[in-house]
Amino acid sequence: MLLSGNRIRQQMASGNIVIKPFDSRHVNPNSVNLTLYHELLAYDDVTLDMKREEKAHVLTIPEKGLVLKPDTLYLGRTNEYTETHGFVPMIEGRSSIGRLGMFVHVTAGFGDVGFCGYWTLEIFVVQPLIIYPDVEVCQIYYHDIDPDYDEYRSAKYQHNNGIQVSQMWQDFQKGV
């Protein structure tokens, strides 16, 4: 079952859901809009390798906007730090963003109960698009979960502070 906007507010009051900074104008009937941070990462190499720690460079989104190009994966993050206890958080792009041909996650819209941090966004556009900082680009929503659960505790992504490139290379070092 999805939480309603009213129930999200109730769970925020109890501390089970944290969104900082929080703007009550961003609450929808069953989600909360999240905004785009003013920096992106773009990988340095065209060919990526799952077994290698990939390098990326920072792009700053100026107030006048930044043109994103197709065939490039950009990593961004939300301005909002979130914590979710007792619910499964998920993000989706807003329909207004989708109608401009912008995807805010390639496959990673599914969060884990107990996740604490900023959401890394895997941004891709189907045609050139000018984007701006602080725009409401995605929405977070919450599912109930069976009461017998363990909270997310991964060292790779938990309590992140910035935009994160893939940490999959660590799995290969462990022999996974």
Image (spheres, rainbow, N blue to C red):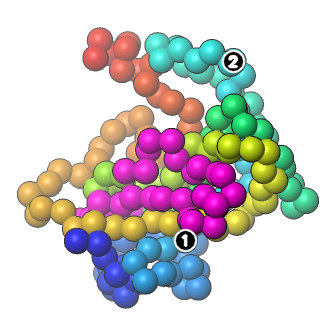
Residue linked to disc 1: 33
> Is 74 located above or below residue 14 in the figure?
above
Cα separation, mark 2 vs mark 1, equals 32 Å
Q: How many marks?
A: 2
State the residue lying farthest toward the right.
64
The one of 126 and 118 positioned closer to us in this rendering: 126
Q: Residue at x 56, y 79 (%)?
A: 26
| Residue 99 x/y as whole percent | 64, 61
| Residue 169 x/y as whole percent | 45, 19
Residue 121 appears anywhere in the view: no
Question: Which circle's residue, 2 or 1, is located before the other in the chain?
Answer: 1
Quadrant (top left/top right/bottom left/bottom right) for the N terminus: bottom left
SS for callout 2: loop
Residue 100 appears anywhere in the view: yes
SS for callout 1: strand
Q: Residue at x 37, y 36 (%)?
A: 155
Residue linked to disc 2: 45
> Is 121 located above or below residue 93 in the figure?
above
| Picture quadrant of residue 38 | bottom right
Q: Magenta stretch: residue 90 in it?
A: yes
